[in-house]
Amino acid sequence: MKILRPESWPQAVRFLCEEQQCLENLPVVQGGLPPDAEEIDVLCLQYAARHEWPTSLPARDRDAILQRFDWARTLAATMLARFRKADGTETGQQMPYPDWEFEPMMIWFLVETWRTAEKLPTDVLARPLPPRPAPQWPPGPETN
């Protein structure tokens, strides 16, 4: 039975697996430029808004998005664990599962928390990350 709206962290992990399988079954186009992290952000935001991927993706883009799904599943799975205070004296409950719709959930998993993964040492992640261009400072008039 396909999960339409997860209501717990275990369901979220399963849901992300199902969504990743749909992505893996998309036809891919070979070639193209190496992915840019901001372009992958845009693809993930479009997916979150429509709950569908383009009919085909460049293989490199799909691989970069699959990397984000791997991260999202890992993150959701870590929310299942109980935790301790810094002094080790008390064990807390698992993080409560938010009551959210598809779009904010996928934006949080695939875009917002991805910036945390980008800050991890590169030996933690299985594949190298797509580069993220440095922000332009001072911002130009088009951003105001």
Image: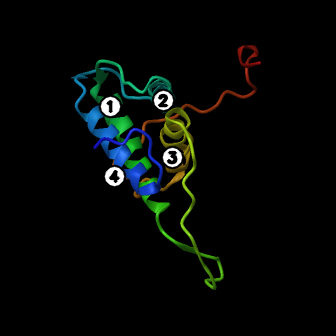
Give the alpha-carbon distance from disc 1 to disc 2, as whole Å: 15 Å
Q: Residue furthest top?
A: 142
What secondary structure is marked by label 2? helix
Residue under numbered circle 2: 48
What secondary structure is marked by label 1? helix
Residues at marks 3 and 2 touching, judged by CB atoms closer than 8 Å: no
Residue 51's quadrant in the figure?
Answer: top left
Residue 56 vs residue 120: left or right? left
What secondary structure is marked by label 3? helix
Give the alpha-carbon distance from disc 3 to disc 2, as whole Å: 20 Å
Label 3 Cα crowd, 10 Å radius (few <14 / some 14-19 / many 20+): some
Residue 2's quadrant in the figure?
Answer: top left
Q: Nearer the viewer, mark 4 or mark 2?
A: 2
Residue positioned 38% across, 24% down in the render: 52
Q: Which mark is residue 118?
A: 3
Residue 68 in the image: state x and y as whole percent.
41, 42
Amino acid on which the number 1 mark rests in the picture: Arg
Amino acid on which the number 4 mark rests in the picture: Ala
Residue under numbered circle 4: 126
Give the alpha-carbon distance from disc 4 to disc 3, as whole Å: 12 Å
Q: Earlier in the sequence, mark 4 or mark 2?
A: 2
Residue 6, above or below 135: below
Q: Which mark is residue 52?
A: none
Residue under numbered circle 1: 62
Residue 11 in the image: state x and y as whole percent.
40, 51
Amino acid on which the number 3 mark rests in the picture: Glu
Q: Earlier in the sequence, mark 1 or mark 4?
A: 1
